[in-house]
Image (cartoon, helix red, strand yellow):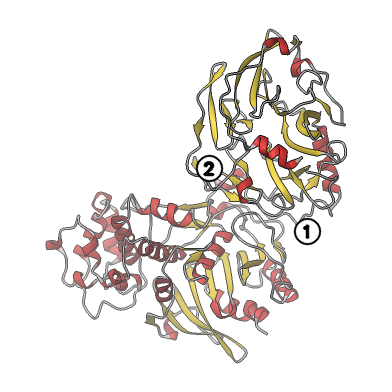
Amino acid sequence: MKTAVSMLLCSVIAFSGQSYSDDEFPLLRGPYMGQKPPGMTAEPFAPGIISKGSWEVEGVFAPGMNEFYFTTDRRGRTRPTVIGFRQEAGVWKKHLEFERRGEIAFSPDGQRMHMAEGYKDRLGHSWSERKSLGPLFDRKDWGIMRLTASEQGTYVFDDYKSKDVIRISRLINGKRQAPKMMGPVVNSGAYTAHPFIAPDESYLIWDSKREGGYGDSDLYISFRRDDGSWGAAINMGESVNSDKWEAYAAVTPDGKYILFNRGVESDNTDIYWVDAKIIDALKSQAESRSGNFPRPPRTVPLATAEEAKLPFREIPLLENAYFSASPQDNNDAVPVGQLGVDGGDRERLLKLAREVAEGQHGKFDSLLIAHKGKLLFESYYRRGRANLPHPQASTTKAYLSLAIGRAIQLGYLSMADLDKPVVSFLDELNPTRFVEGVENITLHSAMTMSSGITISDEQTEAFEKQPAQLKGQGQVQTYLEHSLPINAKTRIFDYKGEDPKLIMQVLNAVVPGTARAFIENELLRKLAIDDYAWSNDDSGFIRGPWGSSMTSRAMIKWGTLVMNRGMWNGEQLIPAAFIDKANSRLVRLAEEDIFFTGSHVSKPGYGYYFWQADMKVGDQYYFTTSGQGGGGQYIIIIEELDLIVVTTTHGRGNKIMHFAATEVLPAFVQ
């Protein structure tokens, strides 16, 4: 049955010249093609009229409930045809017929008819020619049969050429995101296909052949949780499924009924329908049976729409901390595992989480721990929210460093360019007005905070009163005109904002478009980071020293990119040589001059906007590299332990390194 139906549904249609006559269909009046609605047990739809003992599939009403479409191959045809009906003055009449190229699904507003990787736009009572959704979807290596859309613009679609999987693509700030495979909740079993996403994304229905099913492919449903993840797959039960083949479910736009297909006999596939109240019943059943609908002890905290608009320090504190030793799989490119099973001392870290919740270690907003490529521990406190980007402060510099690495990987810069003068990349400057020694400021020196630029606070205030002079490369011109002379005495480690501003200017000059677009397209999208913010500075360009906001899981992704020496999902995004150099002690610092050193943290150093130090556990020392932001925004990477520790706080987080060394590392050291 499955093979025969797949051959039918995946075929490419050639126009045959035949059409179906109006007299094949009787006079139909009233809602739902004049049919009596079903109850809670599935019945054939329009038996003897639409479902006539042949191949009748993919029945779907258009939004507004005045149009109905289905696919058939009657008269022994081998190529399916779509027939469309329209209701006028209460009477249903056939109003069009066309060759089928992909299963039909409508956008919630009814203005677009999706057909696999293509679509048609509504033109009054008719439709445009079929158009392509573009290269993200129209791929020879993918076999899309059905693509459905939500009110938010999310696409969910199947792919029979990739071993029958379902993918999802979201629309974020008007930008179509690259499709991603959904998690094992959906992509399990065999013949996984034909998804239908609810307009409000509250549930997903699809068909699959799984252990414990009724025989052939069955219909399954998953309800979306409050935290955005998908609950367990639930077989829709004997009211819908049978030992036959069930597939192609679609809920009517009025939300009242589910239409789907059942393979009655080897040569007979009919359209069935059932009351959509079964969805509510399944949801209630699932919520009362934890075995079918697993939930964490407490729901992961999410920012409301109103909270997301507030300045960070005005976000209300959580009433209760959230921590999990078995983080949820959110299908967000962050693999998850179980603390204690995949590594780590579970009881020790849960005790630590309770201490953090009580405020014993400072004003934490989040603490996440990844080990051997899996997120094993996730916790949120005070102002922490899983979906809310947290101000990163100077951790932004680490992201800038990785953006330079990406530019090198793509050939816009080279490793040799790191030793070239910054001004050699900027063509809008007037060198005749520079102070002495500017030619000695290289990318290397600026990325190790050793450019030698010296600007007083008074000068900075004066510059800000004349913002026009700081626009574009005027920002660099201003600094290089008014700095103290650049010489050996000034070219020492000095943690300041001018150096990363110079580097961001270089990035903006060498990449196509802008530095912002480059970072978004070549890093953030590659890492599947959708929720973020990043402000501009007075130059009009994206800010270099600080100004970004990332979710805690996004910080885990940045750390993973470094841990994997620039590799992400099999693609070398950043040269390994650059990662190694950026995270080595290019500048060795005196312990007494660095705030985070102490009895368990020593040998501080600085690379390309990454800090280095040794952490001591017992008699053992572990080399660490970290992105650090004032207030406690840290990404700590310990390669020897394959360990990433992420923290966000809103206090003065000067003791985070000590906290990691004394409280977290011992849980992973034998």
Mark closer to the chain start, 2 or 1: 2
Q: Position of residue 271 (x, y in %)?
A: 77, 28
**Relative to 287, does residue 444 appear above or below in the rendering?**
below
Q: Which residue is mark 1?
A: 297
Does residue 179 appear left or right of residue 517 in this picture?
Answer: right
Does residue 392 appear left or right of residue 50 in this picture?
Answer: left
Residue 362 got which mark? none
Camera-side residue of 217 and 3: 3
Q: Which residue is mark 2?
A: 137
Q: Residue at x 47, y 67 (%)?
A: 566
As shown in the figure, which amino acid type bears the numbered disc 2? Phe
Secondary structure at numbered mark 1: loop
Does residue 342 appear left or right of residue 441 in this picture?
Answer: right
Q: Determine the residue located farthest toward the front in the rendered image.
A: 76
Q: Position of residue 26 (x, y in %)?
A: 75, 10
Query: Which of the image's four quarters has the N terminus?
Result: top right
Depth check, mark 2 against mark 1: the one in front is 2
